[in-house]
Structure formats: C-alpha cells, structure tokens
Amino acid sequence: MAETKEINPDIVGRIYPADEMYSVGREKIREFARAVKATSPIHFEVDAAQAAGYVDLVAPPTFAIILAQKADAALIQDESAGIDFSRVVHADQRFTHHRPIIAGDELVTEVHVDNVRVMGAGAMLTTREEITTVTGEKVATCISSLLVRAGE
C-alpha cells in the first residue's frame, strides 16, 4: 500500500518567492481570449486597445490564473508541505486587479500560504499569489483555495 501524505499545517506564513519572469505576449493574450470566449477587440487588435487608452493588447481579467498556477508549482513541489497533487481539488479562485495585464509586461509572482485548515487527514489550503512587474508595480492579487483530499 502506498504511503499517503498529510499536509503540513506549519506551512502557514511561508512565502515562495518568484523564481522566473513571465513575458506577456500578444499571441498569449489572443490565445487565452479565444479559449475563454472573450470577444472584446482590445484582446485581439492593437489599434482597438490603443483607441481605448492602452499601449498594447489587454489580457482578459482571468489571464492572471496562468501566472498564479505556474507560481503555485513551487508550493506543490515542496516535499515539506505534504501536498499530494493527485488529491488536490481547486475549490475557489478570486482576483483583485490593481491594473490590467498588458502585452509587453514582464511579470513575477510570489506565493504566500495564508491558511491551512486541517480536516481529518485532508485540508483546505488558502494561498495568495501577488503578481507584480519586475520593477515592483502591483498588477494583481489572486486568492486560491485548494482542497487537499484525505488519503483512502
């Protein structure tokens, strides 16, 4: 029988610093917009974005999930956290946008473990991903709730 992990409640307060920069490109924005059925021309046409007052294409608000989930990998891969990804269910996701994500942005994401509520051998884990430009300008804050189911 395989050994089951239990989430470590002592990870509350841990911060996983940004480990790489994410370059927001026009095609990434267009592909994401198509995938989520966003239809505004500011996601597809530079002229439309500029006419709306932006310097380049504007990402749909949920584009931030790409950066948040990419950054969450540091936590998931941290053996000391005790998270068995095969038992993770994404329970909730919230975004606070400080400004739009624009093509040409160079962004980094820092992960904060804000809460672990142990429920038997499982737990509800709340993380906060702070997305900023490489120069430190706040772009978005993402709050994620992950249910880590108990082993069988």
Image (spheres, helix red, strand yellow):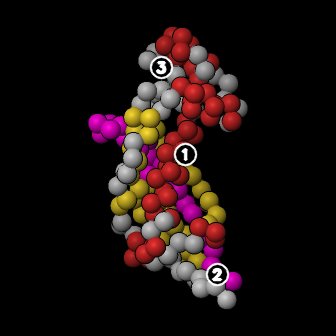
For marks 3 and 2, the one nearer the N-term is 3
Q: Residue at x 59, y 85 (%)?
A: 3
Q: CA distance from mark 1 to mark 2?
A: 27 Å
Dot 1 alpha-carbon crowd within 10 angstroms: few under 14, some 14 to 19, many 20 or more: some
Q: CA distance from mark 1 to mark 3?
A: 20 Å
Q: Which residue, given by chain and number where applicable, does mark 3 sit on? A: 56
Where residue 65 is drawn, which disc sits there?
1
Q: Position of residue 59 (x, y in %)?
A: 54, 30
Residue 11 appears in view: yes
Q: Which residue, given by chain and number where applicable, does mark 2 sit on? A: 151
Q: Residue at x 64, y 81 (%)?
A: 151
In magenta segment, residue 132: yes
Q: Name the side, left or right, on which 70 lies relative to 132.
A: right
For marks 1 and 2, the one nearer the N-term is 1
Residue 100 appears in view: no
Label 3 near label 1: C-beta < 8 Å? no
